Image (cartoon, rainbow, N blue to C red):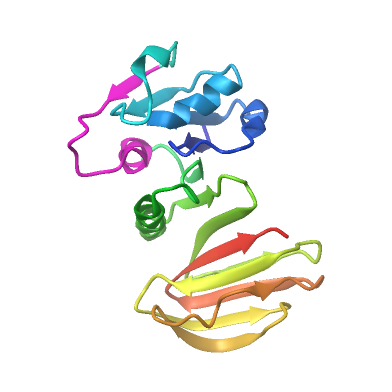
Amino acid sequence: MKKCLIVGFSTPLDTSFLKEISEDTYTIACDGGYLAFLKENKEPDLLVADFDTLDSSLVKNPKKIIKLNPIKDDTDIFYAIKETENKFSKYEIYGALGGTKLEHSLANIAILKYLALKNINATFYSNDLKTKIFTLKDNKISFSKEEKGFISIFSLNDCSYSVTEKGLKYSLTNYDLHSYESLGVSNEFIGEESYIQVKKGILLIVIRKI
């Protein structure tokens, strides 16, 4: 399988994306994220849970269950990723941003950096599916002129070196972006082909649809 899709405890408002899962996608429900699968009458390949946000009596027939001790070092999502990281080069994670637990959202940003250091691609989606976050490490990413919305960048290192933004409302050229700076907040797509590049470092990229 090429991709791993994970659904976290903060169930997305729209779960219809689960209807479109391809056969080469491995699916994981983390605790209360299992409810999203129930809503679509589906079962995940793996359920990882300590059952603090999921009533165990609701569980039907996932292909595999890993029951965790609620007293543990890793979040359910981080455990699921560590359990599978040698099998996949791409992750999509839903139900893990924009919930009531800010600390879990911050933990998931830390997970993005963990995966970036291992050269594994991952994208987290907000509960309303209008915002996604991912990383860019020592590389360049391009966007078509059809892209719309807002885009923000932050450095996940003390400093990300030689950052360039072109084709957006605000341009940046070979700028050394520090982790304490908010310079990269709320740039905009303007109907042009655009790109972001970082020569050395890890950028957190946030794209929010209008």
Residue at the left extreme, as displayed: 71
Q: In the image, is residue 36 above or below residue 199?
A: above
Q: Residue at x 55, y 88 (%)?
A: 174
Work out whether residue 28 can be spotted.
no
Q: Report if residue 118 lies within the magenta region.
A: no
Work out whether residue 164 can be spotted.
yes
Q: In the image, is residue 196 above or below residue 178?
A: above
Horizontal and vertical percent position of residue 136: 51, 65
Could you tell whether 185 is left or right of 117 in the image? right
Q: Residue at x 80, y 66 (%)?
A: 145
Q: How many marks?
A: 0
The boundaries of the magenta stretch are 64-85
Q: Quadrant of the C terminus?
A: bottom right
Q: Report if residue 69 lies within the magenta region.
A: yes
Horizontal and vertical percent position of residue 90: 50, 45
Q: In the image, is residue 56 above or below residue 128?
A: above
| Residue 171: quarter of image | bottom right
Q: Residue at x 50, y 41 (%)?
A: 95
Q: In the image, is residue 141 above or below residue 32?
A: below
Q: Nearer the viewer, residue 195 or 99?
A: 99
| Residue 54: quarter of image | top left
Q: Nearer the viewer, residue 96 or 135?
A: 96
Q: Residue at x 56, y 63 (%)?
A: 206
